[in-house]
Image (cartoon, helix red, strand yellow):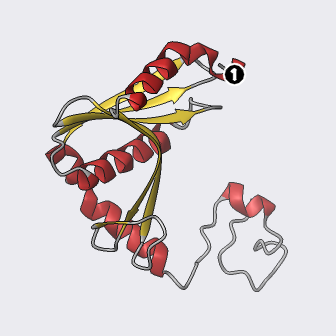
Amino acid sequence: MPNTLKKFEDSFEDLRDKFSNAKCEVEGEWGFTKDWQVTGWMQPDTWARIKLDACVFEDDTSMRVIDFKTGKRFGNEISHGQQALIYAIAAFLRYPETQFIKTELWYLDKNEVAERTYTRDEALVFLPKWHERAVKMTTTTEFLPTPSMSACRWCTFKKGDNPECTYGVSR
């Protein structure tokens, strides 16, 4: 076991055993069409890709979805939680018989785990908003600036230095 994973040695050994018994999938490459139908990772109709570290099939209707993290946890709770929710949604879509999912974020260098549980209905209620956000990300052709004191501080076109900039925030 590499030193970087020692804090989770028992957990990784458990994953290895489950993988040997076809109860675990690792390094999943899940593809979805724009209508959120399951497709291949590199198929012509692939619109969304979800790269999963591990999922464990607990029984016929429940599973765990695991993502390995390193680095800063504090301050990333929202973005990491959103990532885990997307994984849960994708797992529910990929495995229609699943009714319950526990997401686990393993902070490998901190020896911490963040868990969240979802029923099918709880997770899939978020799918329309995620779809809307993804469509916007994949179809936007105009990228307007988002000025702020912090962002404009580093911009070479900031309002104070460039009279043509109508977006910049002055100090």
Q: Which residue is at 70% across, 54% downward?
A: 150
Tell which of 154 and 71 is nearer to you: 71
Q: Amino acid at mark 1?
A: Pro
In the displayed structure, does residue 50 sit left or right of residue 171? Answer: left
Q: Which residue is mark 1?
A: 2
Q: Which residue is at 47% across, 25% downward?
A: 16
Q: Which residue is at 77% across, 59% downward?
A: 153
Give the farthest residue toward the front: 20
In the displayed structure, does residue 19 sit left or right of residue 168? Answer: left
Q: Position of residue 116 (x, y in %)?
A: 32, 31
Dot 1: within a 10 Å radius of its alpha carbon, few (fewer than 14), some, or many (20 or more) residues? few
Helix, strand or loop at mark 1? loop
Residue 46: quadrant of the picture: bottom left
Image height of 145 relative to 88, above or below? below
Q: Quadrant of the N terminus?
A: top right
Q: Position of residue 77 (x, y in %)?
A: 48, 35
